[in-house]
Image: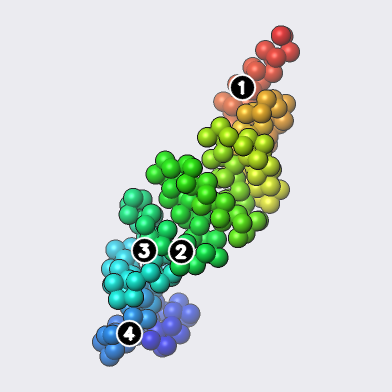
């Protein structure tokens, strides 16, 4: 098993897999070699073979953080979102200081259309890592979608742009936050900034310009 870990660090994955398989043959009761084999397969995006290892490890030692997290991760990667949820929830229970687990759970719940629950998960991720720009931006988007805490959504989107100023998507979401608060000039500026950073916000620019013209006319 230790030899396999060394090969893994050296990125000699074939030798690592062979070492873990030998370790499992020599000590079939030891779950670490099964987990490590699964992790090497995960790194190489061998999703189904990796999943088999992690599921076997979970059967032997249930609810170990790394194991349930990677099971949830693989289900997310392979679009089995409904299966991912319970494992990612187990991961956050096993390690309530893992921002990655809360973030992935938030993405899972978001894709399931459970925006209220997704907000709670992303709040957990942001609490652990206040400079997680993607989580801040997504949390802002979720508040906007629910039509609640729009002032908070604006602040979250502003923070995400401060952390990643060249991200066009984050600027687009900030513009949407401004728009939902009636800040048309700020929204237009942010949409235009999103376009210059590669995000397709042209339709929103035109709609905002029309609203500005109508507002001035009235």
| The one of 102 and 206 positioned closer to us in this rendering | 102
Q: Secondary structure at mark 2?
A: helix
Q: Measure the alpha-carbon separation of dots 2 and 4.
A: 24 Å
Q: Measure the alpha-carbon separation of dots 3 and 1.
A: 44 Å
Question: Where in the figure is residue 148, as x and y percent of width and height?
Answer: 58, 34
Q: Earlier in the sequence, mark 4 or mark 1?
A: 4
- Residue topped by disc 3: 71
Q: Nearer the viewer, mark 3 or mark 2?
A: 2
Q: Secondary structure at mark 4?
A: loop
Q: Measure the alpha-carbon separation of dots 3 and 4.
A: 19 Å
Q: Earlier in the sequence, mark 3 or mark 1?
A: 3
Q: Measure the alpha-carbon separation of dots 3 and 2.
A: 15 Å
- Looking at the image, can residue 63 be seen? yes
- Residue topped by disc 4: 30
Dot 3 and dot 1 residues touching (CB under 8 Å): no
- Residue topped by disc 2: 93
Dot 2 and dot 4 residues touching (CB under 8 Å): no
Q: How is the image coloured?
A: rainbow
Q: Earlier in the sequence, mark 2 or mark 1?
A: 2
Residue placed furthest toward the front: 93
Residue placed furthest toward the bottom: 26
Q: Secondary structure at mark 3?
A: helix
Tag on residue 206?
A: 1
Residue at point 44%, 69% (across, down): 65
Please state if 91 lies on the left or on the right of 154 as rendered: left
Q: Nearer the viewer, mark 3 or mark 1?
A: 3
Tag on residue 166?
A: none
Q: Measure the alpha-carbon separation of dots 4 and 1.
A: 62 Å
Within the image, what quadrant is residue 127 found in?
A: bottom right
Residue at point 38%, 86% (across, down): 1
Q: Earlier in the sequence, mark 2 or mark 4?
A: 4
Number of other residues with Cα within 10 Å of mark 4, as a class: few under 14, some 14 to 19, many 20 or more? some
């Amino acid at each position: 098993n230790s030899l396999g870990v060394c090969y893994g660090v050296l990125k000699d994955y074939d030798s690592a897999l062979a070492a873990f398989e030998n370790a499992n043959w020599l000590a079939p009761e030891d779950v670490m070699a099964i987990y490590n084999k699964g992790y090497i397969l995960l790194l190489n995006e061998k999703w189904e073979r990796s999943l088999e290892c992690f599921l076997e490890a979970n059967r032997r030692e249930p609810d170990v953080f790394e194991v349930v997290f990677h099971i949830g991760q693989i289900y997310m990667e392979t679009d089995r979102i409904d299966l991912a949820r319970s494992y990612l929830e187990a991961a956050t229970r096993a390690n309530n200081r893992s921002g990655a687990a809360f973030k992935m759970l938030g993405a899972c719940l978001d894709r399931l259309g459970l925006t209220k629950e997704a907000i709670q998960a992303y709040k957990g991720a942001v609490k652990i890592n206040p400079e997680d720009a993607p989580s801040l931006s997504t949390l802002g988007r979720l508040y906007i979608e629910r039509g609640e805490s729009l002032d908070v959504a604006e602040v979250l989107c502003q923070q995400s742009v401060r952390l990643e100023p060249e991200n066009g998507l984050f600027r687009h979401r900030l513009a949407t936050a401004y728009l939902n608060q009636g800040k048309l000039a700020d929204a237009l500026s942010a949409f235009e900034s999103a376009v210059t950073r590669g995000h397709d916000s042209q339709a929103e620019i035109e709609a905002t310009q029309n609203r500005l013209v109508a507002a001035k006319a009235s």
